[in-house]
Image: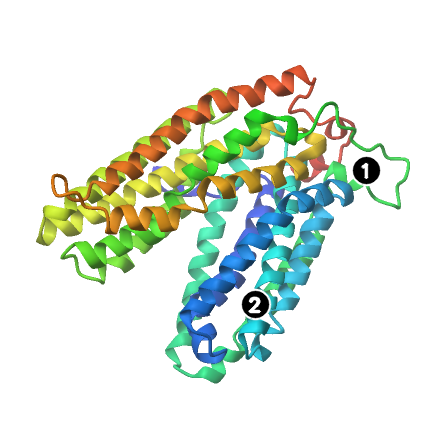
Amino acid sequence: MPGLGSLRRLIPPTPLSRRLATQSLLFATAEGTFLTGSAVFFTQVVGLRAAQVGLGLTVAGVVSFLVAYPAGKLTDRIGPKRMWAAGAFVAALLFAAWPFIGSFSGYLVMVVCFEIIENAGGAGRNAYILNVMPEQERVATQAYMYSALNVGFTVGAIIGGVALAFDNLTVMRWMPLFTLAIGLVNAVFIIRLPRAPHDVARSSNEPSKPTAQPRGRGPLHNVGWMLGSLFSGTMWTNQVLLNVAIPLWLVQATDAPHWLLAWLFGTNTVLCIFLPAYTSRGVRTISDALRSVRISGAFFVASCLITMATHSTAGFLTIFLVWLGHVAVTGAELYFSGASWAFQAKLMDPARRGEYGGVAEVFATLGGRWAPAAYTFLAMSWHPAALPGAGWLVIAGIVVLAVVGMHPSVRMAERFLEREGIGDDDPLAADEAGPAPSLA
């Protein structure tokens, strides 16, 4: 049956890719459970005001931004799997302290520590996937992992919703212990994954193994990589449209019923479970990735234009157009995901993947952290009399500029690697037989 064949294509094809997808499922279930009830937990259990919650997250984001590059360097030094496993283990343990937090100062310390640890672990995770997977399977594997993340967040939301249904603050106070338990299982699962070549080379038990030696200058000399990461951060502001701008627009600028919000996020979740393996298919080269960037940009612009049109519609037409605009921005998310995975696989020095990831995090933050405030103002507050809703055109224009800027930036990064004698082949991977048997 063709239907069953389509479903089977959603299952990762190799043992290692299935293990990585399972890990993504575990991680997202744990995090999704806590995130679903976090608003109630922070405001009613800890006793914080909404402004204090936002301030803490902002401070944590700034601190994480400052340590992103050192964390990437450390990942290259100690090995990606060690970094990932240590980050996952410590992040899980931090949930044991959440039930005992009762002040803003305690919350601030905890959220800053959590952001640093989780982002450091994420740097190890990203480098590990690129190191351990064969080059031709990297983009596809990350697509399957992305689908599994969305399944996990859905499961976590269901579990968190059940806890919220009790309407009991004692239940909510101790809910972080559930996340702790799943998080520890996740950490053990990571530890049991096969070592990537770079982890083997850095093992103190095998001093005879070679270490990958950088073959050229690092990412801070790679102007194309830095600019590409900056524009990538702007492209990822599709998440601001998805989670902030369109929902606010629905509530404040249209006559659409508020229950539509549930349908918007439900549709996004379903599409992000079933479509990543399809939207990333065929993305093998830099040219393929740039084509996906253009498609992503087209979806982004379409979403802005469709949403803008609902300023003057009513009834069922508004409901349909708001939903369609949200679906369009989901397309922008999916197509840019595939492109970004290809850029990571093709434009990083294999011996410096952690460092490259740290630099990318810094510049992507600069490219997109301003968007929640800017897009909210443009969409909700900037309404010239001659063209109501014109702020959406400015938002669309910003993303068009990012799409245009990505092309020369990526090509510049590609030429830098060629000049420095750096390829996307990993000399350690060529010498190691480790990853290959695990795929058999």
Compared to 92, does 300 lie above or below? above
Disc 1 designates what residue?
A: 201
State the residue at coordinates (34%, 39%): 331
In the rendered image, residue 9, in percent from the top left (x then y), is placed at 45, 39
Mark 2 residue element: helix
- Along the line of sight, the residue nearer the viewer: 47 or 176: 47
- Along the line of sight, the residue nearer the viewer: 94 or 11: 94
Between the residue at mark 1 and the residue at mark 2, the CA separation in whole angstroms equals: 38 Å
State the residue at coordinates (72%, 23%): 216
In the rendered image, residue 312, in percent from the top left (x then y), is placed at 10, 47
- Identify the residue at the far right of this view: 208
Q: Is residue 313 left or right of residue 91?
A: left
- Along the line of sight, the residue nearer the viewer: 347 or 270: 347
Classify mark 1: residues with Cα within 10 Å, few (<14), some (14-19) or many (20+). Answer: many
* Visible residue check, residue 277: no
Compared to 89, does 414 lie above or below? above
Amino acid on which disc 1 is placed? Ala
In the rendered image, residue 143, in percent from the top left (x then y), is placed at 49, 40
Classify mark 2: residues with Cα within 10 Å, few (<14), some (14-19) or many (20+). Answer: some
Compared to 359, does 290 lie above or below? above
Quarter in which the C terminus is drawn: top right
- Dots 1, 2 in contact, CB < 8 A: no
Q: How is the image coloured?
A: rainbow
- Answer with the quarter of the image where residue 259 lies: bottom left
State the residue at coordinates (62%, 30%): 348
Quarter in which the N terminus is drawn: top left
- Along the line of sight, the residue nearer the viewer: 376 or 11: 376
Disc 2 designates what residue?
A: 108
In the rendered image, residue 252, in percent from the top left (x then y), is placed at 20, 58
Query: For residue 86, which numbered disc appears in the image?
Result: none
Amino acid on which disc 2 is placed? Leu
Mark 1 residue element: helix
